[in-house]
Image: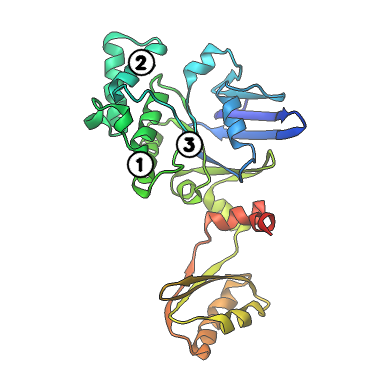
Amino acid sequence: MLDGAAIQCQGLTKRFGQTTALDNLDLAVPEGTVVGFLGPNGAGKTTTLRILAGLSRATSGTAWVVGHPVDLHSSPLQRSIGYLPDQPAFYGWMTGREYMVFVGELFGLGGREVRRRCDELLGLVELSHVAQRRIGGYSRGMKQRLGIAQALINQPKVLLMDEPTSALDPVGRMEVLETLLRLKEQQTTVFLSTHILADAERICDQVAIIDKGRLLVQASVEELRQRYATPVFELEFEEQAGSLVAFLESLTWVQGVKVEQRPQGTLLRVHVSDPLQARRELPQLVASSGLTLRRYEQVLPALEDVFVKLVGVEDRQS
């Protein structure tokens, strides 16, 4: 196992009959980082997390978590990890505190220690004020945060999370992301799958992009932008901009134009191969178009742009 790696996979393969969910996956997650695991539906994200959590057996290959070989019956492994499935299940008739004590006792905690640990974690996820309320009355965001708390009850060195912000409203997402940032400050290694790329962009030190069971790339968001994304200029007009779009698409230094119709105008995202030429010529083209310009800005390429380029989502939909 590599030094400094909290998680490592070598040649990890998982087949379900004739279907290959993981295909010789090689992956390493550094200690004390938050790493996002990205990919389209069916790419193998959940399968990987379940293998790492000891809930499923790989067909071939090897994986280690904090130095322990992954095995379905490994007690050292189970003591070293916390796991949050995409849809955590709770006993709705229990209070949040009762559930935390129950989980703590399953890990062998008792007496003063389990009470102290429960209070600490409920405070970490900001649920202390509803600890005596029945879980059946919790919002989805509160349940997700309770799920994080129960996954931390055994003081794991690695936290595995499958879509921790899925189906949450903006407030719930923000609450969960802020909780993960607090965990990062405590040097807990977090490996999470997500299809919400803005979340990964906000909190992850690195992202690993997987497709058809194979790792495509692993790097920081900034590195991915520099390696794969094209420069983008945003132009916002009060009117329709069909004629300008057609002209821009005919230029050799324009790689593509995405059009977003808005209630009070049109937003163009212009992807270019030569940003210097774009900065020289775009203002002149806008001035000669006769359109009313609201905003002109060169923006950082989004992680979504990198994801689309690597995975080819647009090709899949065509």
User: Which comes before the other along the chain, label 2 or label 1?
Assistant: 2
Q: Position of residue 48 (x, y in %)?
A: 61, 31
Q: Which residue is mark 3?
A: 33
Q: Position of residue 98 (x, y in %)?
A: 30, 19
In the picture shown, does residue 88 fall above or below 199?
above
Q: Nearer the viewer, residue 289 or 100?
A: 100
The reply to whether dot 2 and dot 1 touch (C-beta < 8 Å) is no
The tally of labels here is 3
Asked whether residue 3 appears in the rendered view, the answer is: no
Q: Quadrant of residue 173?
A: top left
Q: Residue at x 57, y 81 (%)?
A: 242
Work out which quarter of the rendered image holds the N terminus and state it. top right
Q: Which residue is mark 1?
A: 178
Dot 3 amino acid type = Thr
**In the structure shown, which secondary structural element does the residue marked by tag 1 occupy?**
helix
Asked whether residue 240 appears in the rendered view, the answer is: yes
Left/right of residue 305 with respect to residue 171 in the rendered view: right
Crowdedness of circle 3 by 10 Å Cα count: few (<14), some, many (20+)?
many
Work out which quarter of the rendered image holds the C terminus and state it. bottom right
Mark 1 against mark 3, which lies toward the viewer? 1
Q: Residue at x 61, y 25 (%)?
A: 51
Dot 2 amino acid type = Phe
Q: Which residue is mark 2?
A: 102
Dot 1 amino acid type = Glu
Q: Residue at x 29, y 23 (%)?
A: 95
Q: Quadrant of residue 277?
A: bottom right
Q: Quadrant of residue 39?
A: top right
Q: Residue at x 53, y 43 (%)?
A: 206
Left/right of residue 145 with respect to residue 244 in the rendered view: left
Disc 3/disc 2 C-alpha distance (Å):
29 Å
**In the structure shown, which secondary structural element does the residue marked by tag 3 occupy?**
loop
